[in-house]
Each structure stands twice: as structure tokens, then as C-alpha cells.
Image: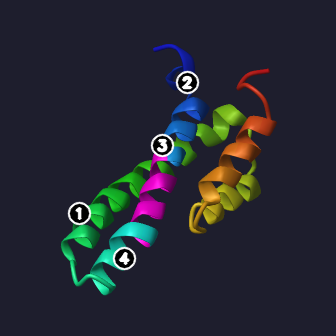
Amino acid sequence: MSGLLAHPVGRFRLISGIEGLSYILLLFVAMPLKYVAGEPLAVRIVGMAHGWLFIGFVLALLAARRPAGWTWTRTVLLFALSLVPFGALAIERFVRAEGPPGR
């Protein structure tokens, strides 16, 4: 592997971004389709995908914790940010500010 996926932090960043996008789609596309347009199928599909991605996010977060040198406080903060709409943007900013892994 090379590039972003070569390190657990890179894999975490990628999964975090995809999971964050699925959360935005769930909240701002699928939910309005369900409650405004009466189309519940969108929530079932996007909700299931988001659920699996969220599990992947948690696993990737835990896998990246030690190699990145994150404390449990930092890890819990990153987890809490994933619960907030657009929190993936803050996660990305925090992780990028720390610089490349292993510096």
C-alpha cells in the first residue's frame, strides 16, 4: 500500500471522510425524503450504509490511536466529533494539524 492507506492514520482519515459524508447524506437527503416526500427507502439504504461505515470509523479510530500517539482524551474527542454533523471536517483538521504519522 502507498499513500493515504499506508498508515493506520491515513486509513482512519479516509474512513472518517466517507463516514462523515454518509452522515450528511442521511441527515440532509434521506431524512427529508422520508419525512417530506414520504419515501422511507432512502433512510433504510443510506442508514444501513452509514451504520456499517460508523462501525468502520470506530475500528479505524481504535487502530490509529497507538500509532498516532493519541491519548484516550484525544480519541474520545475524535469520536465525539463524529456524532456532530460536519464533524468529519473538524476531525480532518485536527489530524492534519498533527502532521504526517511518525514524524
Q: Earlier in the sequence, mark 2 or mark 3?
A: 2
Report crowding for label 2: few under 14, some 14 to 19, many 20 or more residues within 10 A (C-alpha): few
Question: Is 24 covered by the magenta stretch?
Answer: yes
What kind of residue is marked 4? Met
Question: Which secondary structure lies at badge 2?
Answer: helix
Residue at 51% x, 33% y is 11
- The answer to whether residue 33 is left or right of residue 75 is left
Q: Earlier in the sequence, mark 4 or mark 2?
A: 2
Disc 4 versus disc 2: distance between alpha carbons?
32 Å
Residue at 51% x, 13% y is 2
Disc 1 versus disc 4: distance between alpha carbons?
11 Å
Report crowding for label 3: few under 14, some 14 to 19, many 20 or more residues within 10 A (C-alpha): many
Residue interval drawn in magenta: 18-27
**What residue is shown with label 4?**
31
User: Is 40 located above or below residue 60 in the figure?
Assistant: below
Residue 45, numbered circle: 1
Question: Which secondary structure lies at badge 3?
Answer: helix
